[in-house]
Image (cartoon, rainbow, N blue to C red):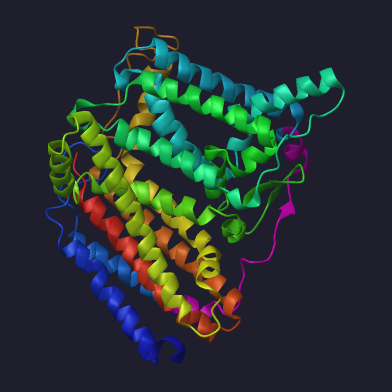
Amino acid sequence: MGLFVKRRSWIAVAGLALVAGPAAALAAPEPALAHALVGKQDLPIPTWLFAWGASLVLIVSFALLSVAWKEPRLQRDSWRPRWGRLSGILLSTPVQIFCGLFGVILLVVVVYSGLNGTEAPDRNFSITFVFVTFWLGLVLLSVLFGDVFRALNPWRATGRAFASVFRLAAGQSRPSPLSYPRWLGHWPAVAGILAFVWLELVYGASGLSLGLRPEDVAVAALVYTGLTFVAMALFGVERWIERGEAFSVYFRMFSELSPVEVREGRLGLRRPLSGATSWGEVPGSLALVLVAIGVTSYDGATEGALADPITETFDLIRDAGLGVVAAFRVNGTIWMALVIGAVVLLFMLGVRGMHTVKGSPPVRELARSFAHTLIPIALAYLVAHYFSLFVYQEQAQFTYLLSDPLGDGSDLFGTASSGVDYGLIGANGVWYTQVGALIVGHVVALTLAHDRALAIYGDSRPAASSQYWMLAVMVGFTCLGLFLLSQANA
């Protein structure tokens, strides 16, 4: 008990986290509901009280971990094969071909509906499918069932099909002309995810009536498909999918939290969260998870906290001589970069603090070692900011959009006249879900960080000392998330 009670550093850092973190919430105006909810709603209790409560949960969790978790438990490989017959069926060649073909069909539908369907974004299949069903839904499936996108990936399926045809024609496999550089790591995936989010949040922002058109989504999908095929031809299908293909790497990042993993052609189980411990080993992995947190934070901040500053800088850029559309997009790009930079800075402050503990590895190595601890935070931010959007838009996706994908009056499945039930979950239910996601995500992140600290420092005392800083980082991220939720406007 004296480990976390008697030491002044513990009292100082915990006190700072408890006081400084919720201070952001105190500055918030009358709170509103999160992203994609219509209308404003008084919260069941004040936002500042949520912030204090969340901070206390983290501090108590830290104290319990320091007492009860004395040795690393997540670092060892715990994977074991399971479900022999089911595994054989799910991973069989016919099922793999079916899943790949299904992914290709969905990609074709997205492109076709984008190019030939209605220009109304809310009536065209492509917009909702890409930015809700695909972008958010596959994260959920990855966390629950492992790397499911690998089987559904249309680019992998197409690349493998062409490789098989060439092998049959030539009688042998064609070696890749280039060897994938180790230093390149996941950086192409980071660039791809940034481009994807920039397309949605900056290029297609709804401000100034710019709106992302279905045609833009279709063209972007075709361009990305072409670039992916070129990269697979240069580096090999599986190598590019593993390292550089943006969505494969992104969804696999979240699948590392899942207890389900396919290995050596067999389906198996591992200890939950243990898969994430090796995430930071590949260059660019830390950048990807920081970008994931940063872009979600930017989206939330534009709805409230940054609304006025963004407007002011937009006026300055426009007055400098750029057109309205160009100024809007340049301004959005700058602010997105600033928010991502702020997220990076917050994390690196925690790493620098840990580095002061005796026996710490170099700063870069320390940062990579704790990269995986941010994955639950990225997941928590996604749930917190897009929960209501997902609940409501998926009703649209699987009713009238699926039945009338082009928005031309078709009714393929008899559900084109269906609507969205906005009463499916109450406003308070949405708020509690969002706050709960933030708290649980950060407690999980704190657990991963504590386990990694024990592995690095070898002794519970310096490990706990190093985690005073990560506690402050987790409280900071939690309160930032709560502040963004309280600022969100319909």
**Picture quadrant of residue 26:** bottom left
User: Of residues 209 and 183, which is closer to you in this image?
Assistant: 183
- Residue at the spot x=71%, y=23% of the render? 161
Check the image and report above or below for 195 versus 428. Answer: above
Residue 446 visible to an observer of this rendering: yes
Q: Give the image location of residue 477, x and y in percent.
A: 34, 61
Q: Would you say 7 lies left or right of 244 here?
A: left
88 falls in the magenta region: yes
- The magenta segment is 63-89
428 falls in the magenta region: no
Which quadrant holds the C terminus? Answer: top left
- Residue at the spot x=28%, y=67% of the render? 53
Residue 430 visible to an observer of this rendering: no
Check the image and report above or below for 137 versus 75. Answer: above
- Residue at the spot x=28%, y=62% of the render? 479
**Picture quadrant of residue 359:** bottom right
Outermost residue toward the right in this view: 171
User: Of residues 443 and 194, which is closer to you in this image?
Assistant: 194
**Picture quadrant of residue 277:** bottom right
- Residue at the spot x=64%, y=43% of the render? 242
Check the image and report above or below for 319 versus 51. Answer: above
Q: Give the image location of residue 139, x and y in percent.
A: 49, 42
